[in-house]
């Protein structure tokens, strides 16, 4: 029997401002053009569950689901994928989910779905996010995106958290939701490890 070589578990990783979410959407939209059923899941920090339809430039549709970043959210990903008969399951910001998301994604991939996850490589301290790290090890394919270093214009692989223009202290919480007001992409040379 001829076999098509399908990449079934794929990771898009990198620092903030690298375009991970855009890449995830681009990959999903390609599948929607190919008439596949696709869904994008992303975490929230409350227990809210919401589903909405996203329409592509071409009038094609996929579903976007906001799920809590906990066990209940993971089981929602599992049940929704089955119920909506998804061929493609995409999960953004995987670094915020507990490690059990890995097993769920492996099972979905083993069941023949294309699973694409995206997430941060390192926290502001320069340490790996464990969930992303695990996915990077077991994936069939890894796409690593860099951002542009705000200091030198080089390739940024790290994310600096700043408070009042200074690197946030090492003992600040790992999870602080934010954007440009708090974070900057930096290269290895320009990144300042927090003290
Ligand atoms: P991202 O989606 O990685 O940021 P982004 O949208 O700028 O990147 P991209 O264009 O590649 O999609 O979101 C990262 C979130 O994680 C953001 O809310 C800040 C948060 N965060 C932490 O909570 N702790 C950390 O140590 C870091 C670096 C980020
Ligand atoms: Mg993003």
Image (tube, rainbow, N blue to C red):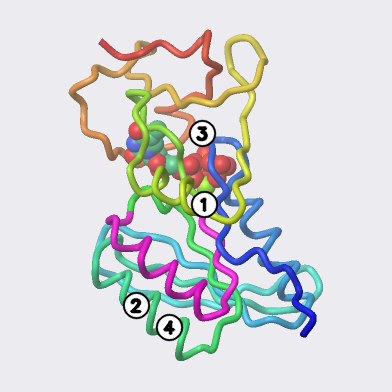
* Figure check: 29 above or below 195: below
The residue at which mark 1 appears reads as 118
Which residue is painted at 47% across and 75% down in the image?
Answer: 108
CB within 8 Å, label 4 to label 1: no
In terms of sequence position, does the residue under pointer 3 or pointer 4 come before the other? 3
**Is 88 placed left or right of 3 in the picture?**
left
Q: Distance between the Cα atoms at labels 1 and 2? A: 18 Å
Whether the residue under disc 1 has CB within 8 Å of ligand 1: yes
Q: How many marks?
A: 4
In terms of sequence position, does the residue under pointer 2 or pointer 3 come before the other? 3
In terms of sequence position, does the residue under pointer 4 or pointer 1 come before the other? 4
The residue at which mark 3 appears reads as 15
Q: Distance between the Cα atoms at labels 2 and 4? A: 6 Å
The residue at which mark 4 appears reads as 80
Mark 2: which secondary structure? helix
Whether the residue under disc 4 has CB within 8 Å of ligand 2: no
In terms of sequence position, does the residue under pointer 1 or pointer 2 come before the other? 2
Which residue is painted at 61% across and 56% down in the image?
Answer: 24
Mark 3: which secondary structure? loop
The residue at which mark 2 appears reads as 76
* Structural crowding at the residue carrying mark 2, measured as other residues with C-alpha within 10 Å and reported as few (<14), some (14–19) or many (≥20): some
CB within 8 Å, label 2 to label 4: yes
Choose between 121 and 44: the one closer to the eye: 121
Quadrant holding the N terminus: bottom right
Provide residue 105's location: percent of width, then percent of height. Answer: 43, 67
Question: Magenta part of the protein: which range?
Answer: 97-117
* Structural crowding at the residue carrying mark 3, measured as other residues with C-alpha within 10 Å and reported as few (<14), some (14–19) or many (≥20): many
* Structural crowding at the residue carrying mark 4, measured as other residues with C-alpha within 10 Å and reported as few (<14), some (14–19) or many (≥20): some
Q: Distance between the Cα atoms at labels 2 and 3? A: 27 Å
Whether the residue under disc 3 has CB within 8 Å of ligand 1: yes
In terms of sequence position, does the residue under pointer 3 or pointer 1 come before the other? 3
**Is 5 placed left or right of 112 in the picture?**
right
């Amino acid at each position: 029997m001829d076999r098509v070589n399908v990449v079934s578990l794929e990771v898009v990783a990198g620092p903030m401002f690298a375009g991970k979410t855009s890449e995830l959407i681009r990959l999903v939209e390609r599948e929607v053009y190919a008439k596949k059923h696709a869904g994008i899941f992303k975490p929230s920090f409350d227990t809210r569950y919401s589903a909405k339809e996203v329409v592509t430039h071409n009038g094609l549709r996929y579903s976007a689901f906001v799920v809590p970043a906990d066990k209940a959210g993971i089981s929602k990903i599992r049940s929704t994928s089955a119920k909506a008969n998804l061929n493609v399951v995409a999960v953004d910001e995987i670094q915020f989910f507990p490690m059990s998301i890995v097993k769920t994604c492996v099972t979905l991939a083993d069941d023949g779905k294309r699973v694409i996850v995206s997430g941060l490589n390192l926290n502001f301290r320069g340490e790996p996010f464990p969930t992303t790290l695990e996915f990077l090890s077991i994936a069939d394919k890894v796409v690593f995106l860099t951002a542009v270093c705000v200091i030198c214009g080089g390739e940024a692989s790290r994310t600096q958290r700043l408070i009042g223009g200074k690197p946030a202290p090492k003992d600040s919480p790992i999870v602080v939701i934010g954007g440009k007001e708090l974070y900057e992409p930096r290269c290895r040379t320009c990144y300042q490890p927090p003290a």
